[in-house]
Image (cartoon, helix red, strand yellow):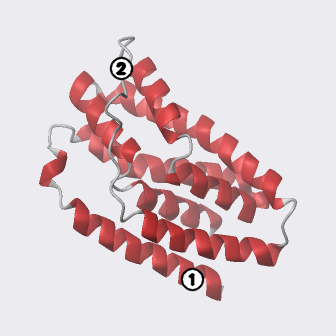
Amino acid sequence: MSVLAISITTVALAEIGDKTQLLSLLLASRYRKPIPIIAAIFLATIANHALAAWLGVVVADYLSPDVLKWVLVISFLAMAAWILVPDKLDDNESISSRGPFVASFIAFFIAEIGDKTQIATSILGAQYADALALVVIGTTVGMLLANVPVVLIGKLSADKLPLDWIRRITAILFMGLAIAAAIF
């Protein structure tokens, strides 16, 4: 698989049922203005993931390629387990009253700090330091693939989606990525 495809797939799968996806639903239901929300998600993700990927490259300077390969395999297995734990927004998380774009940008950037997708981006940046731009582009596309439909279909209630099954299937896909990374 190409770096771009791995980056897109990893983040799109990790984002399913994640707190930032729930945040996207919350923003869509609150503001009902998908274009500024999507633009904010895009820009917040680019900024956050560029920083995360760069930090991954810095860490990669201290690890051998073989160690990085196994860090990637273990991280995919960890993502498979982590994805099974449902995320929810903190009760005290508030959304700014500064309009849909600013509120979405700030909320999304902050929610992404320490998130599964940010950690995955750091690991991908470490693994593919020579293709850092592709990692950032891929992780951003993956984030948009997972969140844009949620924003556009913000009228649907999250409790109507079979999130338990979606999480289980996603965990299986991450196990497949771990096996592929170990073999190739």
Between 109 and 42, the one lying in front of the other is 109
The correct choice, above or below, for 63 with respect to 35 in the image is below
Q: Which mark is residue 116?
A: none
Left or right side of 140 for 58: right
| Residue under the point 49% across and 57% down | 11
From the viewer's side, name the closer residue of 94 and 144: 94
Q: The disc labelled 2 sits on which kind of residue?
A: Pro
Horizontal side, residue 128 vs residue 154: left or right: right
Name the quadrant containing residue 154.
top left
Q: Secondary structure at mark 1?
A: helix
Image position, residue 129 (x, y; %): 77, 58
- For the residues marked 2 and 1, what is the alpha-carbon distance in whole angstroms? 40 Å
Counting other residues with Cα less than 10 Å from the Cα at mark 2, is it few (<14), some (14-19), or many (20 or more)? many
Residue 80 appears in the rendering? yes
Which residue does the image show at 35% across and 50% down from the upper left?
A: 87
The amino acid at mark 1 is Ala
Q: Which type of secondary structure does the marked residue at label 2 adopt?
A: helix
In the picture, which quadrant includes the N terminus?
bottom right
Q: Mark yes or no: residue 1 visible.
A: no
> Mark 1 = which residue?
180
**Label located before the other in sequence (2 or 1):** 2
Q: In which image quadrant can residue 101 be found?
A: top left
**Image quadrant for the C terminus?**
bottom right
Give how far across and how far down residue 30 sits, in percent: 24, 25
Residue holding disc 2: 100
Residue ranking furthest to the bottom: 183
